[in-house]
Image: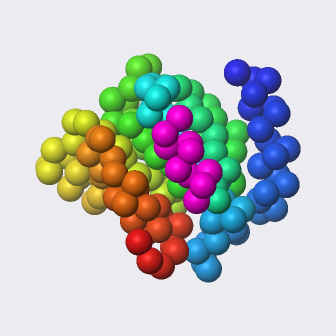
Amino acid sequence: MSRKSADEEPALQRKAKSRDHREGAGNTAAAVALIADDDAQIRSQLRSYLEQSGLTVVEAVDGGDAVRRFQSVWEWVSVVVLAGEMTEMSGYDVFDVLRRIDPGVKVIFCSGSIDADLARMLLLKGAVDCLSKPVSLQELAFALNRATGKSGG
């Protein structure tokens, strides 16, 4: 785990010179996305789509791993895609921790268990979007555009 994080960091530094790349112009060419889901197949699908969208992807296998990875690369993260329910720590709890580290973090929830009241609460707390699994690529593209400031959908 540490080895992978150490190997990822130089690549992230090359792609993102500073935290400022997250702001303005909707530039995702140098953007980093953190995916946190305990389902490897879902992570793989999300990774494929996000990389095709020009993002560098860092994966986390559960909630605790998401917090640890975010702590080491938060300066470069443009968007976080979180599952709601994960082992070790739920995505909802991860969201609270990430917001303490970076109050401006852009989070998209992808979960099979988000009802309207929970979605409303998460949006009021600052989530960009709450998508129900299975997530369509069109919904994900729209949410990603909102998170990164790109126009279109």
Pick the front one: 118 or 11: 11
Residue 119 falls left or right of residue 98: left
**Is 78 on the left-hand or right-hand side of 144?**
right
At 25% from the left edge and 36% from the top edge, which residue is drawn? Answer: 112
Q: Is residue 61 magenta?
A: no
Position above or below: 1 against 106: above
Would you say the magenta stretch is mainly helix, strand or loop? Answer: helix
- Colouring scheme, one of rainbow, by chain, secondary structure, one colour: rainbow
The span picked out in magenta is 44-53
Measuring from the top left, give residue 24's x and y in whole percent.
Answer: 60, 78
Q: Residue at x 49, y 43 (%)?
A: 46
* Residue 51 is one of the magenta-drawn residues: yes
Q: How many marks?
A: 0
Quarter containing the C terminus: bottom left
Q: Please name the residue shown 14% across and 49% down the image.
A: 117
Q: Is residue 101 visible?
A: no
Q: Position of residue 55 (x, y in %)?
A: 63, 55
Left or right for 6, reference 70: right
The image quadrant where one finds the N terminus is top right
